[in-house]
Amino acid sequence: MDKIYSINGPVVKVKNSRSFSMLEMVYVGNKRLISEVIGVNSEFTTIQVYEGTTGLMPGEPVVGTGAAMSALLGPGIITNIFDGIERPLRSLAELTGAFIGDGAAVSSLDTEKKYQVTLTVKKGDRLSAGQVYATCPETPVITHRCMLSPLSKGGEVVWTAPDGEYCINDTVAKIRTDRGTEEELTLCQRWPIRTPRPSARRLPIDRPLITGQRVIDTIAPIAKGGTAAIPGGFGTGKTMTQHQLAKWCDADIIVYIGCGERGNEMTQVLEEFSELIDPRTGRPLTDRTVLIANTSNMPVSAREASIYTGITLAEYYRDMGYHIAIMADSTSRWAEALRELSGRLEEMPAEEGFPAYLPSRISEFYERAGYVETLSGAEGSVSIIGAVSPQGSDFSEPVTQNTKRFVRCFWALDKSLAYARHYPAINWTASYSEYTDDLADYYRKNVAPDFMEVRQEISNILAKESSLMEIVKLMGADVLPDDQKLLIETAKAVRVGFLQQNAYHKDDTYVPLDKQYRMMKLILCFFEQGREALEKGCTVSSITGTGWVERIIKVKYDIPNDKPELFDEYIDRMQKDFAELTGGVTVGA
Amino acid sequence: MELKYIGLDEINGPLVALEGVSGIGYDEMAELRLADGTKRLGRVVEVSEDRAVLQVFEGTKGLSLGNTTTKFEGKPMMLPLSTEMLGRIFSGAGKPIDGLGDVYPERFADINGKPLNPVSREYPRNYINTGISSIDALMTLIRGQKLPIFSGSGLSHNKLAVQIVRQARIAEESGRDFAVVFGAMGVKNDVADYFRRSFEETGSLQRVVMFLNMSNDPIIERILTPRCALTCAEYLAFEHDMHILVILTDMTAYAEALREFSSSKGEIPARKGYPGYLYSDLASLYERAGVVKGSKGSVTQIPILTMPNDDITHPVPDLTGYITEGQIVLDRGLDQTGVYPAVSVLPSLSRLMKDGIGEGYTREDHQMCANQLFAAYAKVSDARSLASVIGEEELSAADKSYLRFGRLFEEHFIDQGFEVNRSIQQTLDLGWELLSTLPKNELDRVDEEHIEKFYDPERAKTIFNL
């Protein structure tokens, strides 16, 4: 029997053993703490423990499981809340009380619950890897499709159970492989979390993940199957932005990974999501959400695993043909977990103590996103939105820089915007999206033919404003000529009326693309009318005197999302007001 | 049979190593007895089959390889707990130092605590009225929150903490079950004395448990101090249904102790020499705040830390800000102009505030008033920097009104004084009065209905003598 030789924090060593393989899951100690082998050499096997090691003694047993750290995949995942190694927190609470104890053995999924299963294959059918053999309603909005594991070679169906109620471990079908062996198929399967699940092929990215957040959807949109990073110092609203996206984006399923963050935030997600109703399904948001909560005071090695557990769950549902969005809050905590473990292993550090393999780990993670054709021929996608918490709000630190290299969408959160309570505090000049061109066709066809041009004009106004602000800061706004003053007023309407969005307002928390477009048009109409009025001799103060800037700023509240036709009235009224204004000038002159 | 080991094999800083030992658990406590009969406490920080590394809390001064005997306790550091702890003073390692003898324990608890299951937490919603306008209105303290004070050396953070303790009122509080746990890490003797005297003067000493580790006490003991304090707080809150306010000062001294300990263990340093696990370590303290389902009590934390060189990007405030639910930042510039409390409004924040204020908690206009005050004060700094370049005379009328607002805001709202205790109604009314000194069209975070109700420039003129 293998025994513990030494213990240092979450790292345990076994001496002179040849029984363990790399990344194998093992049980350590009398309490059977869940652990993973992370290093093997002729003298020592190094193991990281996913639970607290207080009280552990050298000489206690270490037992291998023969399999890599893997996740149990099957019905019962959605609506659940897991820790970093897929232990259901609700069952843990029943077992060990409010405080999490060590060595609690619970099944990841409820093995007693019965699902109404419909078999989709019959005796004699051929079944290959990734193909669906049974379905069952998992929540009122998600139908679970049981697929042959991609590890299987496939074969002929020789027996199926009748449709009916089954638990996840009941056999519902049997296949005979070409070698003549029989495989029993249940409702669940296991998959090693560090290995990406295969798909038939990657498809080009061409449709947006619509979030209802104006600054994202128009200025820096993300595609389905895309990747985005949200870097920002503390208090800039990373978590808030992630919550908004999780609530409103048009993915079928949300996997929310709370990686090394606050316990109260996870409680908030749990509470809020069960109260909020998804406008598209009429059901609570929890019906399409999986939570992975490994808060900052839970064991650090489980924090490292939580990211992989989350993405494995997401890939599993992608293979059923769903669109999944992953919110990872925060990837910096994950990187710090890597650093902490690397330090315990006495590895040679690279930048700021982070291990040299940090960039490759980050890229491996983000590369698991994508829009794919699944093995069964369906289309599905995994989009990743990772928050980054740069140390000292300094975007040049290693995690932010390496993340920036591997994501195509960058939403930089800005301290000064957050200080002025401009939320979402996404800085429009520092943020970018490389998906804009890929998505142009979608916007043209589905929103408005001139959407991209309108969007560009709005960006131009903002860009010009930021260069004018340099002068204003030095000499005040009064020195500017009238047309530039008008631009500054218009830019104010864009910033306060359009980019700033109130997450607590019933209409403003989610804004459909059509309304976003009409809001931009309204602002451009004001700019246009204003310029004409200037040419006709009006002053900027008379233009602002019309009150239209304030009216545009409040349009997000004043026009409900379901009454877009009111925008036409606004434009009519604005044109009338300006006609009066310019008319007045000509009469006076 | 009790095993005692004679002698040590290595002494390095606060760490000692013993070889040829067996049956030792990780994190276990040990007692070291010197030749002269004095005892010291140690904790196992690394263990292998035949060797254990101990950290000695009282320091290794006077230890030699030959003069000690070590006895292992077979369990991690346990703190004796009892409701009798209220009103008592303990050392940083949990030993009574007020001369009143040992506490008769109701039970013992591992000071490291256990992580609270997120599904067993209750989301904190009830606010604590501190009577300090800047905090109550703009960064409301919520029961179960962790809200640190970021300060600098020489600023009035201690005074502020005392004022909060003195004035803190829980919304539907009966007063009976409210108590303070005070943990001092590496503070000067006179600072600890200041706290003790202040608690005494306000008559709250009987409701305070103090854990004191002075700056001349061994640094290793400092690592235990907050853990003892929080274990005691959790016990009182979750087993005796009390509302506990935990004040920890100074977290920077704690982090420095951790750094010293880490480097003596020969660990690889991350930023500024702090260990790579500083975040996890701080989180294991700060996360021990909250409300648990099925318990009436709560643990609210106000850790105080001094930012070295007033640098908010220093690892300690930086990592703290990422874990805690907001921060109260004190500002040297304001302090020098005599403003007390010198709360720097813009970088300060309370993340839990939005759910604990408004109708049913404070007043329905609270959020709107706070948003507008923040937004307006943010513009004040723009106007000020512009004024410093082109002169105040050249500013536009709107910018001038912002300058005036800024001045009034600092004089009347922030600068409140140590003795003044304002109700939330007074605070919000004052906020609206200040906002009324601005032109109406500048109030872009407020809807018409509230402008109608609260915007009253005439009244503002008479109040502020404009």
Image (cartoon, coloured by chain):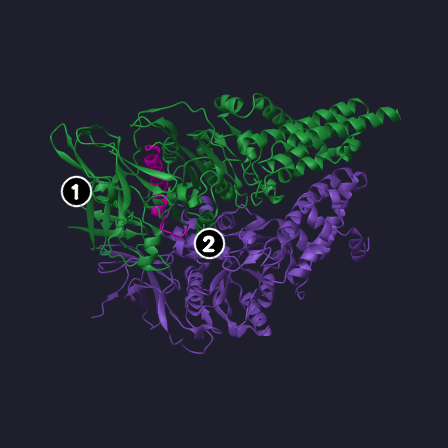
Range of residues picked out in magenta = A296-320
Q: Is residue B165 magenta?
A: no
Disc 2 with disc 1 on a shared chain: no
- Of all chains in the rendering, the one displayed in purple is B
Front-most of residues B376 and A353: B376
Query: Quick one: which residue is furthest to the bottom in this view?
Result: B100
Q: How many discs appear?
A: 2
Mark 2 residue element: helix
Q: In the image, residue B218 lies at what x, y percent?
A: 43, 63
Residue under mark 1: which chain is it in? A
Classified by dominant secondary structure, the portion drawn in magenta counts as helix
Q: In the image, residue A589 lies at what x, y percent?
A: 88, 24
Image quarter hosting the N terminus of chain B: bottom left
Q: Which amino acid type is shown beneath numbered disc 2?
A: Ala
Q: Is B138 situated above or below A184?
A: below
Q: Nearer the viewer, mark 2 or mark 1?
A: 1
Front-most of residues B441 and A564: A564
Q: In the image, residue A570 lies at what x, y percent?
A: 68, 32
Per the image, the residue denoted by label 1 is A18
Report which colour depicts chain A.
green
Q: Which amino acid type is shown beneath numbered disc 1?
A: Arg
Front-most of residues B196 and A567: A567
Is residue B44 visible in the rendered image? The answer is no
User: On the image, which quarter does residue A535 sit in?
Assistant: top right
Is residue B205 visible in the rendered image? The answer is yes
Per the image, the residue denoted by label 2 is B255
Image side of residue B256 versus residue B334, left or right: left
